[in-house]
């Protein structure tokens, strides 16, 4: 049987039930459209939410952790070597938080082809002085250019310029939450008290808004030099080294390698932010599940339509088989009908999904916590369209295959005798 004749007959049967065919194609189209737009919106939202933390988090952090001594004095005394030691209330070792050989570590990391960039960081516990009230806070000392390159620091600055930290001595970028409590404005002088009880005057040059309100009520930023002054340390003092990798998945492996190589504590981003990856995975799975259910429902619609068509066209099938069409030819006709509905619905649905995504992308998103985001986020990844179209075609193929088996075994003699 020639393919040409199969498609001609399939076309004739489709046109004979044009309304039902149109309904089936619309069902597939809307299923694909909702699948694409839902996945695009959800992935865009995942990227936005995870970016609030992950963009500001190093892939690997090198630091000296505060922990109890591995060995107590009694354990070092050979006299008590074979005794059981019951030690209570063990206190942390009197170790410094400063990282030694900072320059050597930086040079080694900058030569590592797996490392995208390295940025130093300091943190100082302070109190923001608000009249007779003191607000607890943390001032982070950073290198602005490296922080902006690796962690998009400038994207979170509102009402100021991040580079002013480098150009103006004793300047500070306040967290928006802190600024709101202090009623601080750009150009104001504020007082902070360090953990050692020393007071410093700092000039406000901008505001930082991460989108996480609790952090913005505490954190502020200064230059490395200013933070070293707050801590009363020398210009070589460094407590944190932030590392950004080309491949984030290598972070756990490299963290262990660097910890051994530099004899220092290392924390990878997967360990520090495991809950965010879990949340993203759960939202993605839910989105895929909903989209796939929509496509399966559309497949059942095609299945029902083809079943009804077979019952109504029993005499036509009998005549086809009586005139020389084989069972496989009849099966191909109905599969062609099903795939025609599925393919046309999938293509229209993909285009419709793109339109829905564009509409969502232009809906205003007004949030005080995220002033830089003006509209709802949407991911236009081609993979969502590819998955939707392929799954729609596969679903409609099986929706046509089962009824086509029934049509292929129709006995023309019994149908004609019954007529």
Image: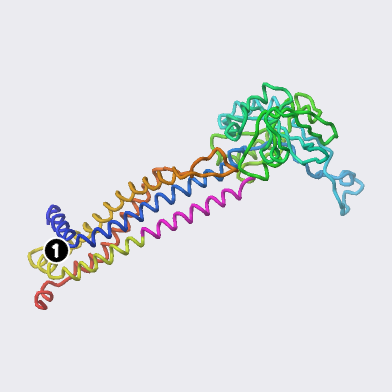
Count of picture labels: 1
| Residue 413 on image: x %, y % | 10, 74
Structure colour scheme? rainbow
Residue position marked by numbered label 1 in the rendering:
326
Q: Position of residue 9 (x, y in %)?
A: 14, 58
- What secondary structure is found at the residue carrying circle 1? loop
Q: Closer to the camera, 401 or 35?
A: 35
At 74% from the left and 31% from the top, the residue drawn is 99
Q: Residue 157's x, y, as percent?
A: 61, 33
Q: What residue is at 77 percent from the left and 37 percent from the top?
A: 128
Q: What stretch is highlighted in magenta?
A: 272-295
Relative depth, front residue between 112 and 145: 145
- Is residue 292 within the magenta segment? yes
Whether residue 252 is visible here, answered yes or no, is no
Q: Is residue 287 magenta?
A: yes
Q: Seen from this angle, which residue lies furthest right?
A: 79
Quadrant position of residue 212 = top right
Toward which corner of the image does residue 237 lie, by quadrant? Answer: top right
Does 110 sit above or below residue 30? above
| Pointer 1 local density, CA inside 10 Å: few below 14, some 14–19, many at least 20 | some
In this view, the residue farthest toward the top is 167
Q: Nearer the viewer, residue 104 or 183?
A: 183
Name the residue located 76 percent from the left edge and 28 percent from the top edge. 228
List the single residue furthest toward the left: 323
Q: In which quarter of the image is residue 73?
A: top right
Q: Can residue 200 be seen here?
A: yes
Which quadrant is home to the C terminus? bottom left
* Position of 26 relative to 237 (above/below): below
């Amino acid at each position: 049987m020639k393919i040409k004749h199969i498609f001609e007959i399939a076309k004739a049967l489709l046109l004979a039930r044009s309304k039902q065919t149109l309904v089936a194609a619309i069902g597939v189209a809307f299923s694909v459209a909702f699948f694409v737009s839902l996945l695009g919106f959800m992935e865009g939202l995942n990227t936005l939410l995870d970016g609030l933390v992950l963009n500001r988090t190093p892939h690997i952090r090198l630091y000296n952790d505060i922990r109890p001594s591995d060995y107590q004095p009694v354990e070092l005394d050979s006299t008590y070597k074979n005794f059981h030691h019951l030690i209570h209330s063990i206190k942390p070792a009197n170790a410094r938080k400063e990282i030694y050989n900072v320059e050597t570590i930086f040079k080694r990391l900058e030569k590592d082809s797996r490392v995208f960039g390295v940025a130093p960081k300091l943190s100082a516990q302070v109190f923001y002085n608000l009249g007779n009230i003191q607000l607890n806070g943390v001032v982070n000392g950073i290198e602005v250019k490296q922080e902006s390159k690796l962690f998009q620091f400038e994207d979170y600055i509102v009402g100021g310029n991040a580079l002013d930290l480098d150009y103006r001595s004793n300047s500070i970028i306040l967290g928006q939450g802190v600024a709101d409590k202090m009623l601080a404005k750009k150009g104001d002088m504020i007082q902070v008290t360090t953990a050692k009880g020393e007071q410093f005057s700092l000039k406000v040059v901008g505001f930082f808004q991460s989108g996480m309100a609790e952090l913005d009520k505490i954190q502020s930023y200064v230059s490395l030099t200013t933070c070293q002054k707050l801590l009363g340390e020398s210009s070589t003092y460094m407590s944190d080294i932030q590392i950004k990798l080309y491949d984030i998945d290598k972070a756990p492996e490299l963290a262990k390698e660097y910890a051994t190589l530099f004899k220092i504590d290392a924390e990878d981003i997967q360990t520090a932010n495991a809950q965010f990856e879990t949340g993203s995975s759960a939202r993605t799975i839910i989105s895929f599940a909903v989209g796939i259910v929509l496509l399966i429902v559309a497949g059942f619609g095609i299945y029902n339509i083809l079943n009804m068509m077979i019952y109504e066209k029993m005499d036509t099938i009998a005549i086809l088989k009586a005139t020389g069409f084989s069972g496989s030819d009849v099966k191909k006709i109905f599969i062609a009908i099903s795939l025609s509905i599925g393919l046309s619905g999938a293509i229209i649905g993909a285009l419709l999904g793109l339109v829905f995504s564009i509409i969502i992308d232009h809906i205003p998103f007004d949030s005080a916590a995220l002033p830089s985001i003006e509209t709802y986020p949407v991911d236009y990844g081609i993979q969502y369209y590819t998955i939707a179209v392929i799954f729609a075609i596969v679903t409609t193929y099986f929706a046509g295959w089962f009824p086509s088996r029934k049509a292929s075994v129709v006995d023309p003699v019994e149908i004609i005798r019954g007529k």
